[in-house]
Image (spheres, rainbow, N blue to C red):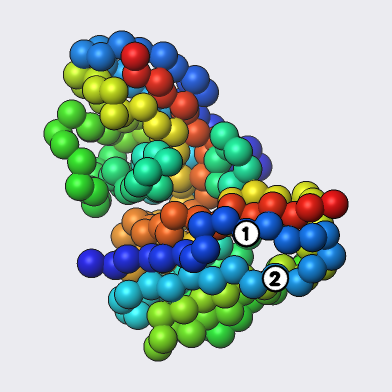
């Protein structure tokens, strides 16, 4: 079974631009979550999508948005990029059983550098 | 608000040593706790998941324990090897949705 895949793996943008990152979950997984990882803040939750609906949202500005398609693939978009948006963006997928056995599986991440 | 702490931030040990990595959390009403490994610049690999009703889980040389009432978990690594060098993160699932709250991780270096 293929793991979680993320594209692109590396991205360089300049301030003010926008960017779209893509995540394909493990086959059969219906939940996709996005996290931002920086050296200072660690891993911070951005949002979770389940059945094409945002189910939970972290404490990030509205410049960060996402969506999920009917095949469970998800995209996240960051508009008006700032230098502080430079980070490793990770997505995770799960079966979304909402139970105690739910395991999250992470992709390799997209490294975004904002100049 | 759930907060997860991992101390120390870094640890260096000689090869062959048994070691314990600690994780503490503030809200004991958790669904489960997961330990992950992250190699530099890479994604996270799930090592062990402990359900809220369980006390420990084992996989090979790894053993994770959970004391929900005191808000603590430990990851025990037996007979450490240089290949174990990585950052180890613990994360708790507090609600029915899939959100995880992470600690900042412990960077482990195992010296040959």
Element type where label 1 sits in the image:
strand
Q: Are marks 2 and 1 in contact (CB under 8 Å)?
A: yes
- Closer to the camera, A14 or A7? A14
The residue that label 1 is drawn on is B11
Residue at image coords 24%, 43% = A53
The residue carrying pointer 1 sits among few (fewer than 14), some (14 to 19) or many (20 or more) residues within 10 Å by Cα, namely some
Specify the label residue A28 is tagged with: none
In the image, residue A5 above or below residue A103: above
Element type where label 2 sits in the image:
strand
Taking A25 as reference, is A18 left or right? left
In the image, residue A111 above or below residue A4: above
The residue that label 2 is drawn on is B19
**Circle 1 chain:** B
- Can you give x and y, in whole percent of width and height, for residue B30 in the image? 37, 75
Residue at image coords 30%, 28% = A85
- Can you give x and y, in whole percent of width and height, for residue B77 in the image? 71, 68
- Can you give x and y, in whole percent of width and height, for residue A96 in the image? 40, 57
3D distance between C-alphas at marks 2 and 1: 10 Å
Return the disc, 2 or 1, that comes first in the chain's sequence. Answer: 1
How many tags in the picture? 2
Residue at image coords 40%, 88% = B69
**Circle 2 chain:** B
- Quarter of the rendering containing residue B25: bottom left
């Amino acid at each position: 079974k293929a793991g979680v895949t993320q594209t692109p793996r590396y991205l360089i943008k300049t301030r003010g631009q926008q960017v779209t990152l893509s995540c394909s979950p493990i086959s059969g997984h219906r939940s996709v979550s996005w996290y931002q990882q920086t050296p200072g803040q660690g891993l911070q939750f951005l949002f979770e999508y389940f059945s094409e609906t945002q189910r939970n949202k972290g404490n990030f500005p509205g410049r960060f948005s996402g969506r999920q398609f009917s095949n469970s693939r998800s995209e996240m978009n960051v508009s008006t990029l700032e230098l502080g948006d430079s980070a490793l963006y990770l997505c995770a997928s799960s079966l979304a059983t909402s139970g105690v056995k739910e395991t999250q599986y992470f992709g390799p991440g997209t490294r975004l550098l904002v100049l | 608000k759930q907060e997860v702490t991992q101390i120390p931030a870094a640890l260096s040990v000689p090869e062959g040593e048994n070691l314990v990595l600690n994780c503490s959390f503030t809200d004991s009403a958790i669904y489960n706790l997961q330990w992950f490994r992250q190699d530099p610049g890479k994604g996270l690999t799930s090592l062990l998941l402990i359900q809220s009703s369980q006390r420990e889980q084992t996989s090979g040389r790894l053993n994770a324990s959970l004391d929900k009432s005191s808000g603590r978990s430990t990851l025990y690594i037996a007979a450490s090897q240089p290949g174990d060098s990585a950052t180890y993160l613990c994360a708790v699932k507090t609600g029915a949705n899939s959100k995880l709250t992470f600690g900042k991780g412990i960077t482990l270096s195992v010296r040959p």
